[in-house]
Amino acid sequence: MLKWASLALLSLIALVVVAPRVVAQDSRDPVRDAEIRDRSGEVLANISWRSTLRLELPPNPRGIGKVTVEWGDVPAPERLAVSLPLRGLEHFSVSDGETAWLVSVSSHDGSVRCSRQDRSGPQVSEENPIPSDSMDAILVNRHVLANDTRHTCGFTIELPLNDLSPSAHSLRIEWIDFYR
C-alpha cells in the first residue's frame, strides 16, 4: 500500500482523471483499504474506509461510467454510499458477481425503482420484495448541486452490503444518466 503522502497525491491526480473521491468516515471504525480501477483495470486510486464506504463520483460529460472497488482480504464494507452528479438515473448497479443491486429513478415523476438479483435465487422486485431481515432499505436521495451549470441535481444512493458473498473481494459500480 502507498504511504499517506503518496496516497493523497495519487488521489488528487486520479480525481483529474475521473476517479471517485472518498468522503469523510467515522473515526471509531477500523480503517480498511481498497483500490479503485477503471474499465481497463488500471488503478486510479487507493482508498481507505470504515464501516461505510462513501464515494463521490465526479461529473462525466457522457453520463455513463463504471468503476471497480477491490479490497482484497480485509472485511468488506457494511454499507456503500455513492454520490452521482446526474440529472436523471436511468440505471445504477452494484455487483459483487453473485448479487446485483439495481436502482433507477424516473426522469418524469422521480419515482424510485430498486431491485436485487441473485445468481442463486429468484429476482427480488416489487412483486417479490427484499425480505426485511436479510437487507435494509436502499436509500436514494435527490439533491441540488451548487455552482454547477451542466448538472442541476445529483443522487446519493446508500445500500447495505450485508448480503455480499463471503468470497466477494470487489464491487463493480455502473451508472447511466437519462440525459447523455
Image (cartoon, rainbow, N blue to C red):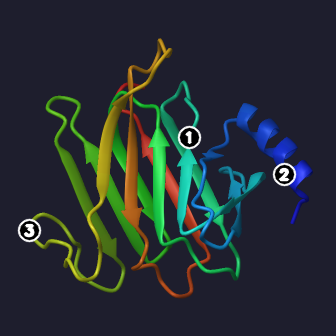
At a point 46% along the width and 32% down the height, the residue shown is 85
Mark 1 and mark 3 in contact? Answer it, CB < 8 Å: no
Quadrant of residue 20 in the image?
A: top right
**Residue 38 position in % (x across, y down):** 68, 50
Residue 57: assigned label: 1
Question: Percent x, y for residue 10?
Answer: 84, 45
Residue pictured at 32% horizontal, 32% vertical: 88
In the rendered picture of this protein, how many numbered marks are placed on residues? 3
| Camera-side mark, 3 or 2 | 2
Q: CA distance from mark 2 to mark 1?
A: 18 Å
In this picture, residue 130 sits left or right of residue 165: left
The CA distance from mark 3 to mark 2 is 45 Å
Dot 3 crowding, Cα within 10 Å, few <14, some 14–19, many 20+: few
> In this image, 177 relative to 67: left or right?
left
Residue at 68 percent of width and 80 percent of height: 74
- Measuring from the top left, give residue 140's x and y in whole percent: 30, 48
Report the residue marked by disc 3: 127
> Where 176 sits versus 135, above or below?
above
| Amino acid at the residue labelled 2 | Leu
**Which residue lies under the disc numbered 2?**
7
Disc 3 marks a residue whose amino acid type is Glu
For marks 3 and 2 on the same chain, the one whose residue lies earlier in the sequence? 2
The residue lying at 23 percent from left, 31 percent from top is: 107
Find residue 35 and report its horizontal and vertical position in percent: 72, 61
Q: Earlier in the sequence, mark 2 or mark 1?
A: 2
| On screen, residue 77 above or below 103 | below
Quadrant of the rendering where the N terminus is positioned: bottom right
Q: Nearer the viewer, residue 80 or 105?
A: 80
